[in-house]
Amino acid sequence: MEENYIAVEISGMKKKHLEILLEDMRDDIKLVLEGQQVLRNEMGRMEERLSAKIDLNTDKIDILIEKIDHNTARIDAVGVDLKTHRADTEIHHGVYRVQELQKD
């Protein structure tokens, strides 16, 4: 009978020890989950900040593209004017003379 009592007592001690271990594990798991939630929240805020920066840069790029297109049109217009001026100058051969610059 004493053996049964000792076995029950050891079994009770094992059960109590197991309960303590499980409680510690439960606390550790809660800490890990809380840490994961903090990381998810921070990643969400980071995504919002990066999205705002990307949107701002996209707007700036669109403005630069418009400026480039406008300047390209202006350069093309100058080219047309220059071509017209040159043709006009060549018509007046005796009065004006157009020569290409020679590269040294």
Image (cartoon, helix red, strand yellow):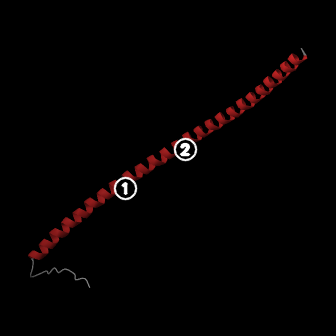
Front residue of 98/102: it is 102
Against 63, residue 19 (above or below) is: above
The residue labelled by disc 2 is: 46
Image position of 70 with respect to 86: above or below: above
Where disc 2 sits, the SS reads: helix
Q: Position of residue 94 (x, y in %)?
A: 9, 82
Q: Quadrant of the C terminus?
A: bottom left
Q: Measuring 30% from the left and 60% from the top, which residue is drawn there?
A: 71
> Horizontally, is 5 left or right of 15 in the view?
right
Of circles 1 and 2, the one toward us is 2
Q: Amino acid at mark 1?
A: Leu
Residue corresponding to mark 1: 64
Eyeballing the image, is 24 above or below 68? above
Return the x and y of residue 27 as percentages of the image width and height.
Answer: 72, 31
Q: Name the side, left or right, on which 31 lies relative to 70.
A: right
Q: CA distance from mark 1 to mark 2?
A: 27 Å
| Marked residue nearer the N-terminal end (1 or 2) | 2
The foreground one among 47 and 80 is 47
Residue type (three-letter) at the residue carrying disc 2: Met
Give the residue displayed 25% in from the left and 59% down from the top.
Answer: 73
Q: Position of residue 39 (x, y in %)?
A: 60, 40
State the residue at coordinates (23%, 62%).
76
Q: Judge left or right: residue 57 versus residue 49.
A: left
Q: Looking at the figure, which quarter contains the N terminus?
A: top right
Residue 4 percent location from the top left of the image: 86, 16
